[in-house]
Amino acid sequence: MSILKSRLHEKILEHRPRTTRLLKEFGEKVIGEVTVSQAIGGMRGVKSLVTDISYLDPMEGIRYRGYTLPEVFEKLPKPPGAEMPYVEALYFMLLTGDIPTEDEMKEVLADFGNRRTIPHYVWDVIDSFPSESHPMAILSAAVMALQRESRFTVCYEKGISKMDYWDSTYEDATNLMSKIPLIGAYIYNKLYKPEAGHRYPDPALDLGGNFAYMMGQEKPYDDVARMYFIIHADHESGNVSAHTAHLVGSALSDVYYSTAAMINGLAGPLHGLANQEVLRWLQGLNEQMGDKTPSTEEMKQYVWDTLNSGQVIPGYGHAVLRKTDPRYTIQRDFCLKNLPDDKLFSLVSKLYEVVPDILREHGKAKNPWPNVDAQSGVVQWFYGITEYDFYTVLFAIGRSVGVLSNLVWDRALGYSLERPKSLTTAMIEDMVGANDK
Ligand code: HAX
């Protein structure tokens, strides 16, 4: 058994009694309540999911296994000469809560490298899509095609103990995590760089380095990829993509079914697609201005025009966060260091100065501050990935790190089939006395 897998197994054995005790001794204790607004309004804030992999504080932002993002970037090991950590190190940390040592890292990297082979039928599925298809639809289908490789499904059919579900789920998760960046790069080349053809993975490179290589990108895009995948990895369990994966997995659908579901949820404009929408919206502003840089007044007008036409400002607002997203700040700091004079970055920085006040004046959004999506496209654009339809695929590769870690733990702790209760409108009216007046 690999170091990562045996460490994970130790952690699972340590953790299981805590879950069992909570259920047995404290199962009837109340930890929250549900209001009518929450039932109708997308279950905001209902405390009904459990994960130890990340926690989102509305003011502070995300912590992975207790570490803030700046701490994650500081503590995780990095490839020689790189500024950003190994994505594989994050996978190790999300699964075990431990920072991998150098020796552990070597083994994890070799293990990931050995799992990169992709069956030919997956390329055939991708190739059969028309070039106008959205890359997220292609990614979802490619992951679904890979389902045939599921070890969990084979083990389940043979009949295994619930206690062992985590093992084959871990194998599936690590296989998919190793393969999904290759699938993403293949989709990119097929749609936007057909003349370049398919690049085979370089076994000497880590996940981020190999992704950059397969995308045909020079340094420092390897670090850009590592940063991007790490900041997008997890945002606790209730967001659409993480929750969808967990929900589908709760039926014991394997990680391929669950991850494809995650991808489908992420593809919505209120969620992951917002990073594509930010770029589309910024291009709209540029087109309106011609070559001219918009003044602050012109920018304010563009924001108001968007709001007055009943649309949202993409990249702003959040269901949980109530301050600037630290994932925005990390990318902003990266831009200040690496592309301070970039035109698009200046535009995004100026928007940061005007949008929060406008959203406050508009009076609807509970959080007027930018989220991760307001900055991520700018970085990609600067390094030559200007096909913004593709940005959510990058998000999905990053989100897989968190979603797959969670799926392994879901099976390790035997989390139940999800089945919340629904009520009719009439029942709620009765319960709250709406018919009494
Ligand atoms: N622009 C304009 N109006 C906004 C807004 C924005 N950026 N953010 C919220 N609002 C509006 C909502 O549409 C809602 O209006 P109605 O009452 O008319 O329905 C009102 O303010 C209250 O919404 P909220 O409680 O503040 O926010 P929600 O929890 O309902 O929604 C969203 C959170 C992220 C969906 C929302 O802020 C939004 O649509 N933002 C723009 C899209 C975006 O950036 N999405 C990415 C979010 C981060 C993420 O998941 N990334 O993947």
Image: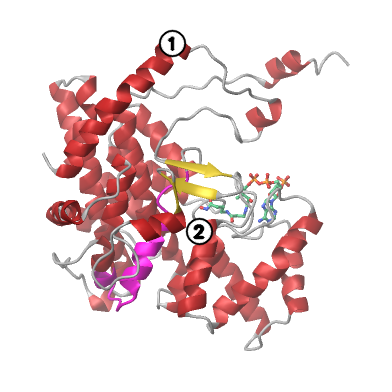
Q: Give the residue at mark 1.
A: 25
Q: In this view, does 334 lie to the left or right of 351?
A: left
- Tell me, yes or no, if residue 133 can be seen here: no
Which of 403/148 is in front? 403
Other residues around mark 2 within 10 Å, as few (<14) / some (14–19) / many (≥20): many
Foreground disc of the pair 2, 1: 1
Identify the residue at image location x=37%, y=28%: 250
> Where does residue 145 sit, x and y in percent of width and height?
24, 46
Residue furthest right in the image = 437
Q: Does the magenta stretch include residue 8?
A: no
> Where does residue 218 sit, x and y in percent of width and height?
29, 79
Q: Give the residue at mark 2.
A: 327
Q: Quadrant of the C terminus?
A: top right
The quarter of the picture where residue 410 lies is top left
SS category of the residue bearing label 1:
helix
Q: How many labels does the image show?
A: 2
Identify the residue at image location x=66%, y=60%: 313
Indicate if the residue with disc 1 has its beta carbon within 8 Å of ligand 1: no
